Image (spheres, grey):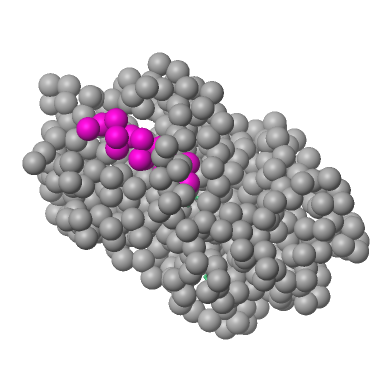
Amino acid sequence: MKKAIVVGSGAGGATAAKELQGKFDVTVLEAGKAFHPFAPNLSVMEKLKKTGCFFDEKHIQLLFPAMQIRKTEDKMILVNGIGLGGTTTISAGNGIRVDDDLRRLGINLDAEFEELYSEVPITTEHQRYWNKTTKQLFDICTQMDLNPRPTPKMGFYDRCKRCGRCVLGCPHEVKWDSRKFLEIAINNGINLITNCKVEKLIIKNGLVTGVQARQGWQTRFYPADLVILAAGGFETPVILQNSGIGCESSLFVDPVLCVSAEWHGCLQNKEIPMPFVVQKEHFILSPYFDFLSFYFNKGWKHSSSNILSLMIKLADLNTGSISNKKIIKPITDKDKERLNEGVEICTEILTRMGIEKNDIFLGTINAGHPGGMLPLTVQEADTLHHRRLPPNLYIADATLFPASLGNPPILTIMAMAKKVSKLCT
Ligand SMILES: Cc1cc2nc3c(=O)[nH]c(=O)nc-3n(C[C@H](O)[C@H](O)[C@H](O)COP(=O)(O)OP(=O)(O)OC[C@H]3O[C@@H](n4cnc5c(N)ncnc54)[C@H](O)[C@@H]3O)c2cc1C
Ligand code: SF4
């Protein structure tokens, strides 16, 4: 049987591996190791925070190696997952279909979404368990005609312990992540190699013959008839560029800014993150306890149980790039204008809760939805194969998206990975 290599085991990689096994003899090469949720007790962490020993977001990696943190020149924090399950293990569990831009290009993912809806448990049942503050926020958003909607969540939320640790890795196996697809793929016979970082593709006579990867101190060549890159929106472009395939300077990341205030006993730190969503043209709004800002932003002084916070997740302009592994991602004036629009709406929501305007403070801008550096065009809508790639090389992550979704991308990446897996065989 022909050999396929899938690079990465996150949303795109795990999906492609599951779909391709059987048609190919699939090997998944994953840079990280097995995923373990963040273990430390958060009350102890909060006491440690008061000693001032947390001063750089990059320190998280020491306690939580599955979370990779980088910073841009604008001091935006970029977050992604490294390890089995990729970033899906540290996601908020949102499963939303957002394929309008792809559809406009002529890419129809209806069949793939249907398949996903039968494979991944997606529910809004969590609404039954919302705490008082979440219900109040939802009511205020309704009164403001913001049309809030309970967020579809991937997982088994009837078992949810309401610990609020979703983005630190669910300790109770409630939240769905792509390791579930990986398990199926492993049972079907894929070969999984962890701690194996793909550096570049080996291309001969216009075809990919395999990949060069680093495992510890060793560099190895893995031969393949087909390669699927799904190392995520930050890493897939690096592999392409290392292999002599240029990308566009069109990186998007979906910056997140939290608008927050003290609100006694709101217990948002124990609520599921993003229980409901308000969709606006260029951003979404959602209640969200921001751990990064809480631990590392000096302005976040209040106790974790007393901070009420609303997230603005922006569909940023695709104006960034990755070059020699350096990520250049300015927050443009247009992005700032749109973020300010979000801050105004959040301020209105919080003041309707009874909070004084002057007591409102902002979080640190962070982002974790990278993509866009080799965007598909109308010409590639039928093949999902970018014209710059050798015929036996495909991409199955958000690198292909023509624009930021400004929304949780996992489900759409998985739908795309399914379609890529059908078209590359
Ligand atoms: C805190 C946070 C919360 C989020 N919450 C949500 C949410 O609720 N819903 C949602 O839809 N989206 C969410 N996202 C975004 C979402 O998780 C990612 O966009 C999505 O997982 C990307 O899928 P992917 O397959 O492209 O990459 P990833 O899931 O990041 O997987 C890439 C994999 O490739 C591996 N890899 C990287 N480089 C190499 C290499 N050179 N060689 C081999 N392997 C490599 C990585 O270790 C990783 O396992 C969140 C993101 C963050 C940061
Ligand atoms: S709140 Fe629920 S889904 Fe989130 S980590 Fe806790 S148990 Fe898991």
Task: Please provide the residue range marked out in magenta.
Answer: 411-425
Q: Quadrant of ligand 2?
A: bottom right
- Res. 201 in view: no
Q: Within the magenta stretch, is there residue 414?
A: yes
Looking at the image, residue 399 sits to the left or right of residue 183; the answer is: right
Nearer the observer, 341 or 157: 157
State the quadrant of the N terminus: top left
345 versus 362 height, above or below? above
Q: Residue 353: where, in percent of width, then height?
A: 87, 62
Q: Residue at x 37, y 45 (%)?
A: 12
Looking at the image, residue 219 sits to the left or right of residue 309; the answer is: left
Residue 326 in which image quadrant: top left
Q: Residue 386: where, in percent of width, then height?
A: 34, 24
Residue 124 in which image quadrant: bottom right
Q: Residue at x 29, y 61 (%)?
A: 183
Looking at the image, residue 39 sits to the left or right of residue 10; the answer is: right
326 versus 157 height, above or below? above
Q: Residue 150: where, in percent of width, then height?
A: 67, 55
Q: Residue furthest left?
A: 1
Q: Residue 84: where, in percent of width, then height?
A: 33, 59
Q: Residue at x 19, y 35 (%)?
A: 226
Residue 414 in which image quadrant: top left
Looking at the image, residue 298 sits to the left or right of residue 385; the answer is: right
- Res. 2 in view: yes
Q: Residue furthest top?
A: 379
Magenta stretch, main secondary structure, is helix
